[in-house]
Image (cartoon, rainbow, N blue to C red):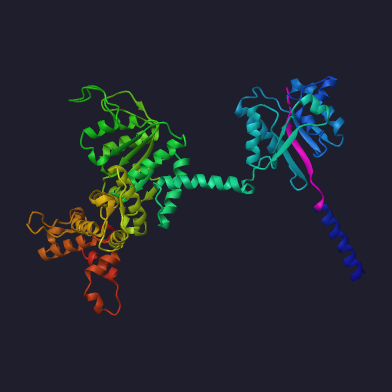
Amino acid sequence: MITAHLFWKELFKLFRGHLKMNTAPKKQVAVSFLGTVLDKGFGQGRWLKWRPNVAMNQRQDFHLDRMELFYAEKYRELADHVKADIQQVSPHTVVNLVPMELANPWDFSEVYTKLHDWAAGYTFNIEEETYLTHITTGTHVAQICLFLLVESRQIPGVLLQTAPPKNQRRSMGDGNVGSYEIIDLDLARYDVLAERLAAVRDDAVRYLKSGISTQNAAFNHMIAEIEQVALNSPSPILLSGPTGAGKSMLARRIFELKKARHLIKGTFVDVNCATLRGDGAASALFGHKKGAFTGAAEKREGYLKTADGGVLFLDEIGELGLDEQAMLLKAIEEKHFYPVGSDSEVKSDFQLIAGTNRDLRREIRAGRFREDLFARINIWNYPLPALANRREDIEPNVEHQLALASQELGRTTRFNKEALAAYLDFAHSDQAPWRGNFRDLAASIMRLATLAPQGRIQVEQVQAEIERLKWLWSEEPFSDGLLHKRPSEKAQDYSDKVDWDTLDLFDKLQLQHVIDECRKHPNMAAAGRALFNVSRTERAKVNDSDRLRKYLQRFGLEWGDI
């Protein structure tokens, strides 16, 4: 029977032994190539020559317990000689000669494969040993491969770089065996470098935003992801959103960023598909051979060929005909296509950025867009919000547009304090739907800058501009009757949902007016508040969205249809 005293005594002995085991210094192991030139030397004069694998073992402040020394069989004599010299200067160092036969030491694939296979079969004991990978000897290819294996942790540890002393013969004779540096690839330990890398990425994000300090969190997150995609993926990018939301500008910035980082060498080709009509659409996109059709007097390369090696931006891609969509799908997937009238294929390798203001999923259901093409271009889909949905970003964009206007006009233009406050109050209000999005904003600022006396925008100019914008967005007729209230543009698109011929004139006019009013507002709640502006005050429980939803459902419509 063991007493409590003996139990705790034995337990303390075990604990003390465990502490000693864990605090014992780790053994240091070097992994290195035999330097067939640098390590060479057989006569007595070799001790006055800096030999990297020998010299690191001559240091008094550096201790190696073991070396794994790669060598080729034809250099076996040199390897044996270097091993003997190492053990002469450092008897405690065990040197393992590791055969490494390379048919071509400059063949990256061969060198990496051989080193990878060695690392995969080697028993690393990171609990008891520290591994130093020596990158001074070996071909440059071998050094790069060792770097990659350490970086990927397939060889756990750090890099070891050695260097000779100045005045080699005299210094070696005096006991100066050169210098060494330990390089740890854990970037977390290099705060300055990590900050610099982060700054590079932040610069790229700011570049994509044209240097505008946007405040919308969702937009900023989207741009940060686009930056990663732009620099790492050649796959198509789909930019969706209303007209004027900035799709063309962003597409060009993506191209310029890729160009600056040397990821592409070609040009930026900007095509508005809404301008491509009839038989000329295929010719414009894919080119044609001479005589392919009446009027084809000369050969034409087409936009896809022009974009070879660069970026092709197809804005309003939903406007393309089904035949052109099929040809485009083949060109994206196979990187070659047939020009109109040609029996010979043309090659073109480009990155596609597509833009659309339509819901392509709805277009697929209506039979106007190919589902297979949508699947191919929808790998990266980024919906750009309307300006009315990111009003917190209006002010920095005003500053940006004013800078552009000043540059174009050749003079600096500024708001005075009161004028800027008045403009922003209006711009942030529900009175400003910003239907044309950034195009409306850019045009507005250009008008203000042009009319500003002595380059200062006054309250009077702002008030006049506000009236212009209200007129622009108004659907009321001119007093002279020259401009009539336009019918709903959307109503004609709902023939598959609304049977207009069966409706009374009263219902037609009312539904048309409701649709037109809905189009003025960014969401259902805002539209409901406007439509039920009187009756809502008489209700104990207000739910404008639900009332509007039920009204639209009577005619088979949803808010997303508006």
The answer to whether 55 is drawn above or below residue 435 in the figure is above
Count of numbered marks = 0
The image position of residue 540, as x and y in percent, is 29, 80
Residues in magenta? 23-37
- Who's the residue at 75% across and 22% down the image? 73
Residue at far front of view: 454
The answer to whether 346 is drawn above or below residue 370 in the figure is above
Q: Answer with the quarter of the image where residue 322 lies.
A: top left
Residue 261 appears in the figure: yes
- Who's the residue at 62% across and 37% down the image? 148
Quarter containing the C terminus: bottom left
Q: Nearer the viewer, residue 488 or 50?
A: 50
The image position of residue 17, as x and y in percent, is 86, 56
Residue 98 appears in the figure: no
* Drawn side of residue 367 relative to residue 156, left or right: left
Q: Nearer the viewer, residue 497 or 241?
A: 241
Q: Answer with the quarter of the image where residue 156 lies.
A: top right
Quarter containing the N terminus: bottom right
Q: Nearer the viewer, residue 210 or 370?
A: 210
Residue 36 is a magenta residue = yes
Q: Answer with the quarter of the image where residue 345 lies.
A: top left
- Who's the residue at 43% across and 53% down the image? 220
Residue 353 is a magenta residue = no
The image position of residue 327, as x and y in percent, is 31, 34
- Who's the residue at 22% across and 68% down the image? 531
